[in-house]
Image (spheres, rainbow, N blue to C red):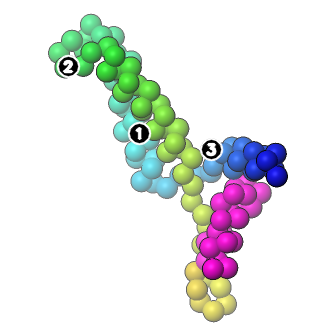
């Protein structure tokens, strides 16, 4: 059970890295990327900003972590059933944990 969960988690993580993110999250990735690039500017040029080198390090790591988390967002496809209701469809091979969760939600 534990190995299966770890396997599903890793497969889902890599699957999410390869899928297209919603536009909202892509915009946030661009904003965080620009903020990260600002933190790479040498401190001599940033003396006019009220940041210490420690604060720049914190900002750098927050932008890296947030950017990676935003990369993991994904879009599921939508399917219209014969009854006319809309159902999210997720590729169970690429995103096994999400597919399992959606299946549980559908049966409730």
50 over 44 or under it: above or below: below
Of label 1 and label 2, which has the lower sequence position?
Answer: 1
Q: Which residue is mark 3?
A: 17
Please state the extent of the stretch shown in magenta in the rendering. 87-108
Q: CA distance from mark 3 to mark 1?
A: 16 Å
Is 53 situated left or right of 80 in this image? left
Report the mark closest to the observer, 3 or 1: 3
Q: Residue at x 30, y 10 (%)?
A: 43
Q: Quadrant of residue 60?
A: top left
Q: Residue at x 69, y 71 (%)?
A: 103
Q: Residue at x 45, y 50 (%)?
A: 25
Percent across and percent down for residue 55 are 31, 21
18 over 106 or under it: above or below: above
Q: Which residue is mark 1?
A: 30
Front-most of 45 and 56? 56
102 over 37 or under it: above or below: below
Q: Residue at x 53, y 38 (%)?
A: 68
Q: Please tell me how crowded label 2 is: few (under 14), some (14-19), or many (20+) other residues with Cα within 10 Å.
A: few
Q: Which residue is mark 2?
A: 49
Residue 37 seen by the camera? no
Q: CA distance from mark 1 to mark 2?
A: 22 Å
Of label 3 and label 1, which has the lower sequence position?
Answer: 3
Would you say residue 106 sits in the magenta stretch? yes
Is 21 situated left or right of 24 in this image? right
Percent across and percent down for residue 40 are 39, 18
Percent across and percent down for residue 39 are 35, 21
Q: Secondary structure at mark 1?
A: helix
């Amino acid at each position: 059970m534990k190995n299966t969960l770890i396997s599903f988690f890793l497969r889902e993580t890599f699957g999410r890295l390869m899928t297209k993110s919603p536009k909202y999250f892509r915009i946030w990735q661009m904003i965080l990327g620009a903020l990260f690039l600002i933190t790479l500017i040498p401190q001599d040029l940033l003396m006019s900003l009220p940041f210490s080198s420690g604060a720049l390090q914190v900002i750098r790591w927050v932008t890296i972590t947030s950017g990676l988390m935003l990369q993991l967002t994904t879009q599921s496809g939508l399917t219209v059933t014969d009854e006319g209701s809309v159902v999210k469809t997720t590729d169970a091979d690429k995103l096994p944990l999400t597919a399992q969760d959606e299946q549980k939600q559908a049966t409730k």
